[in-house]
Image (tube, rainbow, N blue to C red):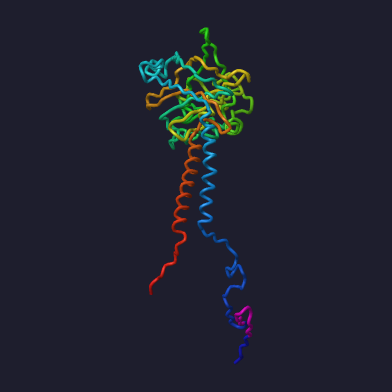
Amino acid sequence: MMASSYNAKEEDGHITVSGPGTLKSKKPDNTAFKQQRLPAWQPILTAGTVLPAFFVIGLLFIPIGIGLYVTSNNIKEFEIDYTGTAPSSPCYNCSVNFSWNSSRPCSCSLPFSLEQPFESNVFVYYGLSNFYQNHRRYVKSRDDSQLNGNIDSLKSPSKECEPYAHSDNKPIAPCGAIANSMFNDTLDLFFIDPNGTRIQIPLTKRGIAWWTDKHVKFRNPGGDSPNLTSVFQGTSKPVNWHRPVSELDSDPENNGFINEDFIVWMRTAALPTFRKLYRIVQKKSHLLPTLPSGNYTLEVVYNYPVRSFDGRKRMILSTISWMGGKNPFLGLAYITVGAVCFFLGVVLLVIHHKYGSRNNSADIPN
């Protein structure tokens, strides 16, 4: 019978035995990491740290909120509703007698006046109410590959576009419910001078879409300068459109899928009441206002019905500032948060002054 040999040695306070059938210790190494002795920051909330934080937030947020609110209020904005629901409205007949099959579009004129002149560039928006562009099926009803100029998707639209994918046994371009419901009213502005002469306000239709949308997400099939008539041959226009996509504009750089009115509409809104940029009134002279105060007329070619879903339509004139359009919510939010923090700081300071010197240790009975 052969005797087994074992060796034992002590390292770092524990014994390691080696030999046949060795049993090694599972004790972790005596390091700061494995023994969890690494230094750590353990913040302790005290009155000296919490109270200054509340006061600093309050003193910072309130002036910022006031500045944002004042800036927002300095933005001039004018809005006119031209839905035509009231019998006294100039657009009432157009709203009531609207027909998709009418060969002659209905027009109406709405007079209005501006009490203050509009300086700098003026942005013309159209607004819709009670229109739920955020509906899940509506948002999905499009073919991004088709809109990006893919020939295969042009001939075979995505199933997501159904039931607006084919018409008369032809693929629809652009397909989907979003494109089919594109806003197509025509809005024109006229200034009425003191002599009674109507002067049309020039409206710029280029530069209203996002640069990334215009040059990246939306492309016409066939390259940069295609013959749109031949490219879209064999396709059908959306059901509710009056003309095909290749005839949206006479300008070849603003026609087809890269038409900026179309691109603006395809960026769906998150809320049922929204506005979208329609045109821009460029400032011509630094000495004269862009839109002087006085009498104006809004000429509307009424092509877009909203009575079926109890919607409303409006035209908005607005200037902008360094923070964008008029939006008082951001300023009010800053003021509210700053005021709440400052109030809580005062309350906690009073509580600390009154009860902070007391002995908080309690005797625990056996």
Residue shown at the point (55%, 18%) measured from the top left:
291
Is residue 21 visible in the rendered structure shown here? yes
What secondary structure predominates along the stretch shown in magenta? strand
- In percent of width and height, residue 178 lies at 47, 30
Q: Nearer the viewer, residue 93 or 229?
A: 93
Q: Is residue 13 magenta?
A: yes
Residue shown at the point (52%, 48%) measured from the top left:
55
Is 142 situated above or below 4?
above
Q: Nearer the viewer, residue 139 or 226?
A: 139
Look at the image and tell me in which quarter the N terminus lies.
Answer: bottom right
Is residue 150 visible in the rendered structure shown here? no
- In percent of width and height, residue 278 lies at 52, 24
Residue at the far top in the pictured view: 195
Is 183 situated above or below 53?
above
- In percent of width and height, residue 361 lies at 44, 66
- In percent of width and height, residue 138 lies at 44, 34
Look at the image and tell me in which quarter the C terminus lies.
Answer: bottom left
The residues colored magenta run: 7-17
Residue shown at the point (54%, 13%) measured from the top left:
200
Q: Nearer the viewer, residue 331 or 203?
A: 331
For residue 311, side relative to residue 276 (left or right)? left
| Number of marks drawn | 0
Q: Classify residue 323 by image quadrant.
A: top right
Q: Is residue 33 magenta?
A: no
Residue at the far bottom in the pictured view: 1
